[in-house]
Amino acid sequence: PKPIEELSIWDDAKAMIAKARAEGIETVHERLAQQTPHCKFCELGTTCRNCTMGPCRISAKMPRGVCGADADVIVARNFGRFIAGGSAGHSDHGRDLIEVLEAIIEGETKDYKITDEAKLKALAAETGIEVEGRELKDVATDVMENFFADFGSRKKEISFLSRVPQKRKDIWAKLGMTPRGVDREIAEMMHRTHMGCDNDAPNTMIHAARTSLSDGWGGSMIGTELSDVIFGTPTPKMSTANLGVIKEDKVNILVHGHNPVVSEMILAAARDPELVEKAEKLGAKGINVAGLCCTGNELLMRQGIPMAGNHLMTELAIITGAVEAVVVDYQCIMPSLVQIAGCYHTKFIDTANKARFSGAIHFDIEPHNALQQAKEIVNLAIEGFAERDAGRVDIPCEPVEIMTGFSNEAVIAALGGSLDPLVQAIAAGDIRGAVGIVGCNNPKIKQDSMNVELAKELIKKDILVLVTGCVTTAAGKAGLLVPDAIEMAGPGLKKVCGALGIPPVLHYGSCVDNARILQLCAALANALNVDISDLPVGASSPEWYSEKAAAIGLYAVASGIYTHLGHPPNILGSEVVTDLATSGLEDLVGATFFIEPDMVKTAEMFDERIKAKRKGLGLSE
Ligand code: SF4
Ligand code: FE2
């Protein structure tokens, strides 16, 4: 494995990697070293195992698989399935929220409720449902049925296309890219990539884009919006981040995964007076819930719960030795956490039947039993407090302050009720443009080095940065999520953010909440009567690793947003697919991917793009 200094920019991470090595505990970094070098064919995307005439590998000497598929077909098929996997993840998460809404409507649960009635009504009106003079329950029922229908096969287009500028919808219609139903597009992607179906790489890529659009404007957007309805729409608030949020004198429970349906209940249970009293009787100064990854982002945005860390901190958080329980729902949870928890007194608890971990304690959290199950989980954590070995506890730092809670509703409220002041700030050039930096960590990259450097480079150029997912913690730890961070920004951004008392880097939520950024772009485009591709905006995922991140990148591009990736997906084995992704899509959808590992250059690329788009809108550079 690499020297510790090369693995992360953070002191808390480096201290815990050193502790892991001293204690003989294996982490992601050791396993990456064992797996390196990786299979070249797989890296290029030119392996196929879609049937048992193969598996096949493509090279100059063997240019076609047994069936006759060439590198272009195989790379496109593999990429298409990769996108289907990511879209399925976000969208199945969205569906779970519809099922919770259903349980609320049918009276199956008292643990969840409709918290933001106004938002529910607004969503109903936006998606063509009558609101005036109707019972809330009837409106909610129609919203539920409509969103369930968005997953099926009977619609010509999904509901939230009501938000998309007409010019963009026309492009999609012309290309056959209009997302019709979430499950339909994902299933069709699997069908198309079966042996003997879609054997034309560009055609497969178009459907991959359609599949990703059904995620961004479908499954993810439903997930975000119904989470707001059920748990409340986020408003700006202060919180803290890094491993210092774990408290030596408290029962520490880390929630990890993506869906607030579980983590909100754990939080509610941890606030139960009886359980708090029990923790205190056992010598703790209370119960501390902190977040990891995206379910952490969900609790942070809505409840101000502190964030212990992002993807590459999940193993390391347990290594503090002070964590009584890690409670997970699904996605991005390294199975190694079970082994690492086993090296300490930490209980690893899974809660979803679709995401079980061998060796974990399992609870089936369903809407009807959620709070009661959550209380049992919290009770287990409390009882574990006595088993903690004080000699192995090391919490390596003090937490840093962060500001969170920037939903579009909150931003519009802060701007006095409309987007006009934002449009004016963009027109005046105080805010030259905006870039969303999203996604993950990847152990192949020094943790958060690129996430942080890109954000700093962009705000210097008066480009507003929106962060979600694992980039949140990166930006927070770098001091970019507090109002004082305007000192690191250019003069225009400093002026605007200073006047509003907000940071130049705004926390916009979890990964499904990238739908909030899509919605903002659509609203800006509609306000200016242009297409999204005409806006001075961009997207980036510098340290991405997952299928979901690729789906996000592709729906951003297909929505007309110029999108940076720090390293390529496994597509370089096909010139056709690579050229399409990095240039050909520009002619089709008005945006492409660009791949660039250097963040100074990346910021310059965004700067050039923003200049060109500003010029196109008749604005100064
Ligand atoms: Fe090989 Fe074709 Fe089968 Fe893929 S589908 S494994 S390329 S024979
Ligand atoms: Fe995420």
Image: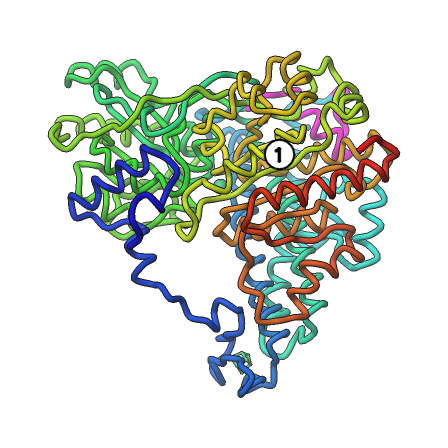
Identify residue for label 1: 458
Q: Is mark 1 within 8 Å of ligand 2?
A: no
Q: x%, y% of residue 485?
A: 54, 21
Residue 217 location, quadrant: top right
Determine the residue positioned at 54% across, 27% down.
230
Left/right of residue 54 with respect to residue 308 in the rendered view: right
Determine the residue positioned at 26% across, 16% down.
286
Between 168 and 45, the residue placed more toward the observer is 45
Magenta run includes residue 238 = no
Left/right of residue 378 with respect to residue 161 in the rendered view: left
Between 200 and 490, the residue placed more toward the observer is 490
Compared to residue 381, the image places residue 272 above or below, namely: above
What quarter of the picture does the N terminus occupy? bottom left
Compared to residue 212, the image places residue 533 above or below, namely: above
Residue 293 location, quadrant: top left
SS for dot 1? helix
Q: Is residue 254 visible?
A: yes
Between 316 and 456, the residue placed more toward the observer is 456
Q: x%, y% of residue 477?
A: 43, 28
Q: x%, y% of residue 512?
A: 56, 39
The magenta span reads 114-133
Q: How many marks?
A: 1
Determine the residue positioned at 48% across, 44% down.
440
Amino acid type at image mark 1: Leu
Compared to residue 126, the image places residue 209 above or below, namely: below
Magenta run includes residue 129 = yes
Compared to residue 25, the image places residue 184 above or below, namely: below
Left/right of residue 331 with respect to residue 344 in the rendered view: right
